[in-house]
Image (tube, rainbow, N blue to C red):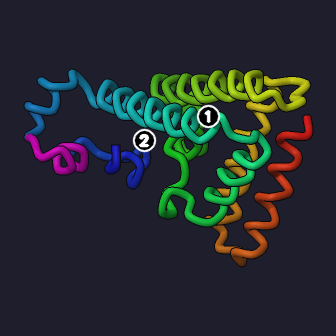
Amino acid sequence: MQALWHGGLGTTSVDALQSAIGIGRSSLYNAFGSKAELVRLAIDSYTQRTVAALDAAFDDRDLQQTVERLLLDAATTNNDGQGCLLLNGLVELHDNDAQTLDAVRDGLRDIARLLVRKAEASGAAVRDPAAFAAKFIAAIAGVRAVQRAALPEALARQVAREFAALVVAG
């Protein structure tokens, strides 16, 4: 997963993957069947970890404060500058690799479903939980772009707080 995150879902070579895993080419194909299947497994693993982390972040916490904290984290640390594997893949792949792009979209849908559930369960006045989920994903992408652009951290924090207010406002 780290090799794909660093090199890109569509552009990381089989050689790079086998080096990262520490196995030979034939062993990689015997274990995973294909590069596409290995990429799908990495996307699924990343999605499961992200859903679990988001689930824990929102659990029994104020919706506004949680959204703001998550956006501030994305605007400042941004997964140690790596961003989100799914959002990176969405930008990188365009329509070049339909199978991997479908896996990325499935991952984002899983995250959106969790966000909808958290919005509905929050007790906050979220008029449209589906719109909340879409705005949250868009806000993450936006603040990560601000962070990657190396804009001043104070500005990134301001943008994150303003996006958080917009996401929760409905």
- From the viewer's perspective, tell me whether residue 109 is left or right of residue 37: right
Between 77 and 17, the one lying in front of the other is 77
Q: In the picture, residue 146 is in which quadrant?
A: bottom right
Q: Amino acid at mark 2?
A: Leu
Report, in whole angstroms, how far the alpha carbon at label 2 lies from the one at label 1.
Answer: 31 Å
Residue at (69% x, 21% y) in the render: 117
Residue 45, percent from left and from top: 38, 32
Q: Which residue is mark 2?
A: 9
Between 130 and 127, the one lying in front of the other is 127
Q: Is residue 133 above or below residue 87?
A: above
Q: Which residue is mark 1?
A: 59
Q: Is residue 89 magenta?
A: no
Q: Secondary structure at mark 1?
A: loop
- From the viewer's perspective, tell me whether residue 120 is left or right of residue 69: right
Q: In the picture, residue 137 is in which quadrant?
A: top right
Residue 82, percent from left and from top: 49, 57
Q: Secondary structure at mark 2?
A: loop
Q: Quadrant of the C terminus?
A: top right
Q: Is residue 65 above or below residue 27?
A: below
Q: Amino acid at mark 1?
A: Asp
Residue at (59% x, 41% y) in the render: 57
**Over which residues does the magenta segment extend?**
16-23
